[in-house]
Amino acid sequence: MEEKTLEITDNVRRAMDYAFDEAQRLLSTNGGFMPFTVTVVDEGLELNEHSGETPDDIRESVKMLLAQDMPEGYALCYDGYVETDEGTRDAIVVEVACRGAARADILAMLYIQDADAYTFEPSYAYAGAQAQLYPAGTKPIVSGLAALETEESAQDEDAEEAAPAATDADEADAAGQSCPSAPSADDQPDGEGTVSPA
């Protein structure tokens, strides 16, 4: 496991921390727990348990919840294990992602069960990344001010691009020539044109 700076919002970090705290409490008092999510909703944090026969069932349950609520972020927590330099170790595992993120980060807090007591590592460590569970095409949450600034900037750029084009067309008309317009990206036949990363 390695150190890594997480690119998550403060609210999602609170959800992640709450998930680790709740998992420690449940293990210490009950000896186990059902996988659960802590989601960031308008009202604050919301905890939901997810049951299923397989890990895929759990992930499908989480996907359904995210598609329904579209929260700002989620922390999926379960009792699992990770591979370390010392071999396989028990761990509280939390998968965390913000809405619209390209991936989810996997964090793990190692623990040892000795008789009826659990001893937890003082902090979690980064354990990898995988695809996040939001529906495909989910956009990140953008504050109203940031969205307005982005929209105004795009409008300014469109106006700047349109002005020189109009001037060129006016000059062509004045010279008695027609000025053909360049094909747009939408006019390109499939399989041709520029390639953008997915």
Image (cartoon, grey):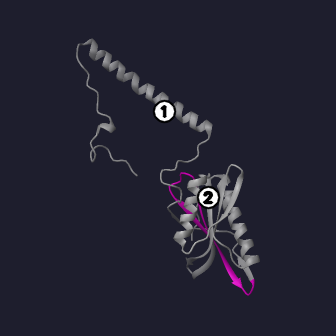
Tell me which segment is drawn in magenta: 94-116
* Image position, residue 35 (x, y; %): 63, 70
Q: Is residue 161 left or right of residue 107?
A: left
Disc with the residue nearer the chain's start (2 vs 1): 2
* Image position, residue 125 (x, y; %): 61, 68
Choose mark 2 or mark 1, whichever is in front: 2
Question: Which residue does the numbered mark 1 point to in the structure image?
Answer: 154
Question: Which residue does the numbered mark 2 point to in the structure image?
Answer: 74
In the image, what residue type sits under mark 1? Ala
Q: CB of mark 2 within 8 Å of CB of mark 1?
A: no
Crowding at mark 2 (Cα within 10 Å: few <14, some 14-19, many 20+): many
Crowding at mark 1 (Cα within 10 Å: few <14, some 14-19, many 20+): few
Q: Is residue 148 magenta?
A: no
Is residue 110 at least partly visible in the picture?
A: yes
Q: Nearest the camera: 87 or 173?
A: 173
* Image position, residue 22 (x, y; %): 72, 68
What residue occupies the far left of the structure in this picture? Answer: 177
Q: Is residue 118 above or below residue 123?
A: below
